């Protein structure tokens, strides 16, 4: 009887695919609703979290393909190997810096692995310009999944789980 139950459990687990995104930046967790930009905090762009960065490097939160690299370097899009579309937007209104303080390390179409470096950014440049450094990490195709759940802890390293997606 136990063996049959174990087979059922294993089969069920295989049918409920899930993916966990890792933090792309070392920093402090911010609830999405506390991000001071209504486009993000309202969830209009999708579910996710905010990060208050402690270091100026963005890493791939999962393996996949770079779908977008903004010319200004302030944002990057990634589609994971399983189809999760992720937007990492470094700071708020930082498009106005016109690339100052940002160095992109990948190009659109590049294949990346979780943990690969994507962008370097200068926290001081952003702060001195008066823009919030809080970085939203959004699953832009949230509606494509059964659930997208914030699983972040207060102190984030680049190996910390932040978002769990159930397909």
Image (tube, rainbow, N blue to C red):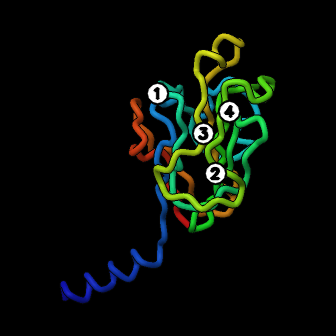
Label 3, secondary structure: give it: strand
Upstream in the sequence, badge 3 or badge 2?
2
Mark-to-mark CA distance, 1 and 4: 17 Å
Tell us which disc is closer to us: 1 or 4: 1
Upstream in the sequence, badge 2 or badge 1?
1
Residue tagged 2: 86
Residue tagged 4: 41
Mark-to-mark CA distance, 2 and 1: 19 Å
Residue tagged 3: 119
Upstream in the sequence, badge 1 or badge 3?
1
Task: Tell me whether circle 1 and circle 3 mark residues in contact (CB < 8 Å).
Answer: no
- At which x and y percent is residue 51? 54, 31
Badge 4 local density, few (<14 within 10 Å), some, or many (20+)? Answer: many
Tell us which disc is closer to us: 3 or 2: 3
Label 4, secondary structure: give it: helix
Label 1, secondary structure: give it: strand
Upstream in the sequence, badge 3 or badge 4?
4
- At which x and y percent is residue 61? 51, 50
Which quadrant of the rendered structure holds the C terminus?
A: bottom right
């Amino acid at each position: 009887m136990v063996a049959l139950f174990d087979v059922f459990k294993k089969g069920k687990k295989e049918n409920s695919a899930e993916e966990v995104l890792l933090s792309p930046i070392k920093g402090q967790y911010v609830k999405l609703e506390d991000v001071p930009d209504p486009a993000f905090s309202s969830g209009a762009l999708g579910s996710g979290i905010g990060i208050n960065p402690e270091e100026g490097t963005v890493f791939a939160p999962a393996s996949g393909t770079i779908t977008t690299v903004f010319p200004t370097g302030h944002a990057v899009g990634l589609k994971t190997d399983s189809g999760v579309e992720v937007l990492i937007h470094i700071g708020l209104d930082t498009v106005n810096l016109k690339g100052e303080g940002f160095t992109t390390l990948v190009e659109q179409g590049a294949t990346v692995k979780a943990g690969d470096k994507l962008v370097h950014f200068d926290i001081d440049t952003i702060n001195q310009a008066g823009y919030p450094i809080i970085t939203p990490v959004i699953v832009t195709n949230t509606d494509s999944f059964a659930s997208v759940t914030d699983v972040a802890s207060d102190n984030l390293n680049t190996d910390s789980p932040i978002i769990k997606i159930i397909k």
